[in-house]
Image (spheres, rainbow, N blue to C red):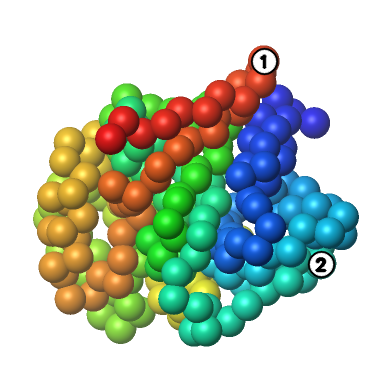
């Protein structure tokens, strides 16, 4: 196993310690979450009673595979905790997410939680967001015009394709991966993007994460947001 995967496994498993009996749990998406879900499935078999709300179809399938009970999001008002991965994390816990294309459902799930924990390998820590192209979910209709409008904000945008096929999100939209290089003000950029008609959501998550569990070669480090 690559050291990055070992780090992902370590933090994914550690995150499960935050989940207590009776909790409603937001289940994030991505490869780090795979390890978290696998471990959570084990604890459920050992008697932990929780219900999960998945943030993507892939997560839902993994949760089912590992025997994690799920609940319909429409039947709950708040979640006790959400655990999710990230593509970039800055020192103020601003995040870029959406490398796997699940940013919209993730944001809805993560924002509904009383406590939001991010799990990531150490390569995700950055001083400034932006080296990872920002995923922006856009409606399919008129996406070329939306792309032009986004590029006027100072980036180059690429329609996401996987294996030569245009990638379609779980919400039936497209993703534009937007290379800004350095994002100076993530809140401002987010609101500029959201003001464009064709933009559904951006992968910028700010004022959301409470704790970040970072995988390092010598163990997991827990970072807490200063309040
Ligand atoms: O859309 C995907 C999500 O935002 C993921 O949480 C993010 O891309 C991190 O994924 P991974 O754990 O695979 O690095």
State left or right for residue 70 relative to residue 133.
right
Is 58 or 38 nearer to us in this picture? Answer: 38
Q: In the rendered structure, which disc, 2 or 1, sits on the residue that comes first in sequence?
A: 2
Q: Is residue 189 above or below residue 191?
A: above
| Residue under numbered circle 2 | 67
Cβ(mark 1) to ligand 1 < 8 Å? no
Q: Give neighbour class at mark 1: few <14, some 14-19, many 20+ (Cα, 10 Å).
A: few
Q: Residue at x 62, y 25 (%)?
A: 220
Q: Nearer the viewer, residue 87 or 42?
A: 42
Could you say where residue 194 lies in the image, as x and y percent from the top left?
A: 19, 65
Q: What number is the disc on residue 182? A: none
Q: Name the residue tied to disc 1.
A: 218
**Residue appearing at x 66%, y 69% in the figure:** 51
Element under label 2? Answer: loop
Q: Quadrant of residue 23?
A: bottom right
Which image quadrant for residue 68? bottom right
The answer to whether residue 64 of the structure is visible from this angle is yes
Can residue 158 be seen here? The reply is no
* Disc 2 and disc 1 in contact, CB within 8 angstroms: no
Task: Tell me the SS state at disc 1.
Answer: loop
Disc 2 to disc 1, C-alpha distance: 31 Å
Give the farthest residue toward the top.
Answer: 218
User: Is 21 on the left or on the right of 144, as rendered?
Assistant: right
The residue at the point 65 percent across, 63 percent down is: 22
Queried on whether the Cβ of the residue with tag 2 lies below 8 angstroms from ligand 1, the answer reads no
Q: Is residue 94 left or right of residue 105?
A: left
Neighbours of disc 2 within 10 Å: few (<14), some (14-19), many (20+): some
- Relative depth, front residue between 23 and 54: 23
Q: Position of residue 54 (x, y in %)?
A: 59, 68
């Amino acid at each position: 196993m690559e050291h990055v995967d070992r780090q992902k496994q370590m933090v994914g498993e550690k995150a499960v310690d935050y989940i207590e009996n009776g909790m409603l749990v937001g289940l994030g998406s991505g490869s780090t979450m795979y390890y978290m879900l696998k471990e959570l499935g084990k604890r459920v078999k050992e008697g932990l009673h929780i219900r999960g709300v998945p943030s993507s179809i892939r997560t839902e399938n993994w949760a089912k595979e590992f025997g994690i009970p799920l609940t319909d999001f429409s039947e709950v008002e708040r979640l006790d905790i959400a655990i999710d991965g990230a593509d970039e994390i800055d020192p103020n816990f601003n995040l870029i997410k959406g490398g796997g294309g699940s940013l919209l459902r993730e944001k809805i799930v993560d924002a509904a939680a009383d406590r939001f924990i991010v799990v990531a390998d150490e390569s995700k820590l950055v001083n400034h967001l932006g080296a990872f192209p920002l995923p922006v979910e856009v409606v399919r209709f008129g996406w070329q015009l939306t792309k032009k409008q986004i590029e006027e904000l100072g980036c180059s945008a690429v329609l996401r394709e996987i294996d030569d096929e245009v990638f379609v999100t779980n919400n039936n939209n497209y993703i534009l991966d937007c290379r800004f290089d350095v994002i100076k003000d993530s809140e401002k950029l987010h609101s500029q993007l959201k003001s464009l008609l064709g933009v559904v959501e951006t992968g910028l998550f700010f004022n959301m994460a409470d704790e970040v569990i970072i995988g390092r070669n010598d163990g997991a480090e827990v970072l807490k947001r200063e309040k």
